[in-house]
Image (cartoon, rainbow, N blue to C red):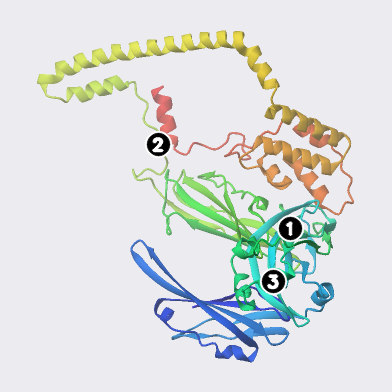
Amino acid sequence: MQATLDRSTVYDGETVTLMIEATGKDESGEPDLSPLSKDFAVLGTSTSQRIQIINGRRSDSRQWQVELEPKKTGSLDIPALSVGRSKTKPLALKVMEQSAVSAVAGDRPVFMRTEASTGSMDVYVQQQILYVVRLYYRVPLLEGDFQDPQPDDAVVERLGEDRHFKTTIKGKDYQVVERHYAIFPEKSGDLLLPAITFTGRTASISSRRSSPMSSDLLIKRFFGRNPFDDPFFGGMAGDPGKRFRVRSEALTLEVKPRPASYTGKFWLPSQALTLQDSWQDPSPEFHVGEPVTRTVTLKAKGLESSQLPVIDFPSVQGVRVYPEQPVSENLTDGDWIFGVSKQTVAYVPSTAGKITLPAVRIDWWDTAKHQQRSAQLPAREIAVLPAAGGTSTPQSPPASDTTPDTAVHDTGSALPAGIQGWWKQWMGYRNILLAAVAVLVLLVVIVWWRNQRHFTRNHGSAVAGAQGRQQHPRTRSRELRAALKAACEANNPHVAAKALLEWAALEWPEQPPRNLGALAQRLASGSEEVRRLDNILYGDGAEAWQGEALWNALKTGLSPRQKHETKGSEGLAPLYPEVQRAGEHSS
């Protein structure tokens, strides 16, 4: 049994939808709604049934949608409801007075209202702001279109599908379309959320009077997935309607910088952050020379996946560590964005005995409790067993003067005496054939090289001229480098950050870094200066920025960090050292 509400907060006079879903034996029963009568008026109930067949197994479920109207304001409890022998869990609903809505609405048939919240009193830079836009109307609309918010110095993401419900204001019934956005401010200070505009057409009075649709039927139409896709909005008997435009009120929020007390390596303002790991084998055994795969999942409420850092796995004595690039995605429940990053790492022990995998720790800022916290995977002690062959360390094949041909002749000598002569004769022909193939390949390479030089000499200038007439990425890269240089010379951090991120988008077109922190993770050189620029932009503004060091670090280009780069100068050993050593001996 599961019970959910389409909204956890409503205003006085609005309706809310309670959804109950039953599976298994209880799906054939009916919910007992009588406990709701204390605080709610039950306006109507609709049911639906779903059948799923997965891998030959059938599962049935049934869903009830109950439209409720709260009888009073305040914090109301929706008690546990019985369906068959099972019960749902209790839910909480907050009903607020709508004096603010009434003041804005007046007697207008169509108006808009917006609000912004973060789940706490303070707003920090890069923290998610939930921005809610509501359109109220009590006349039939023939068509309409929202204008999405476009604030400066902020990233905007739309959350889920539009929601639809009805409410009563000053004794008049209104239909409501509600849309949710996630807004991430990119710098501290005042953030202006401009007014939202809705443009549409209402039906004329004569069309409303001549329409055969009753008010109940109109209400049902407004509860579709998208009311403006309904045929009702295509017009009434050719009625051109009356065009109108309504605007919401603009909002201004104060965005705080990163707190001075925060000591984390990455700025991660989140409502909740979790760090979990799983292994390819639930109970893995470590053997010398055999890789064991571990997946670490980082999930943050109120952060996009592009804001999450790449996890740094510490080196381990006696173990080779091979981290892979993380796989990221964004999820949403309609109110919050959940950034998810999954990173896989392979451990290959090189010696038997006991080893300790160090703890993995991510610091973050709890926006609900206004304090620094950390998510951590504890250290893990591992017993490494010898390799399958019984040795405690990976062994290279023994050096030998025996060539591959000699080994093949040894195989031939084990054949019956009657065909050994044929075998030796075939091996002699094989050597001649291999030599002929090698000579042929060498001739092909020489001819290709000469033709390539001839083509470049005769046609190189024409190709270069044709490329010059197009907007080549290299041309755009040079323009952005010049812009970055000018911004660094002028000590302008905002222009420098914009040029730097656009330049990085050209270097990584398939997965461009969304912020300076993500870019710093990818750079082999200049990462410290990029992080310093990031701190300047998101700090309190007390420190002046000098761009000379950033330009000196990046003027030669954006050098990407090697995939398995570590702090040591020699780099990581190969994943399968035996194969490489065998190749060295045979060469």
| Amino acid identity at mark 3 | Arg
- Residue 426: which numbered mark, if any? none
**Snapshot quadrant of residue 288:** top left
* Residue sitting nearer the eye, 128 or 268: 128
Label 3: few (<14), some or many (≥20) within 10 Å? some
| Amino acid identity at mark 2 | Gln
Percent x, y of residue 172: 75, 80
Label 1: few (<14), some or many (≥20) within 10 Å? many
Q: At x 65% / y 50%, what residue is drawn?
A: 306
Q: At x 49% / y 47%, what residue is drawn?
A: 347
Percent x, y of residue 567: 63, 40
How many numbered dots are placed on residues in this image? 3
Q: Label 3, label 2: how many angstroms apart (C-alpha)?
A: 88 Å
Is 279 on the left-hand or right-hand side of 9?
left
* Residue sitting nearer the eye, 513 or 295: 513
Q: At x 69% / y 74%, what residue is drawn?
A: 209
Q: Nearer the viewer, mark 3 or mark 1?
A: 3
Q: Secondary structure at mark 2?
A: loop
Residue on which disc 2 sits: 395
User: Vertically, is 459 above or below 278?
Assistant: above
User: Vertically, is 100 above or below 348?
Assistant: below
Percent x, y of residue 473: 68, 30
* Quadrant of the snapshot with the C terminus: top left
Residue on which disc 1 sits: 183
* Residue sitting nearer the eye, 327 or 369: 327
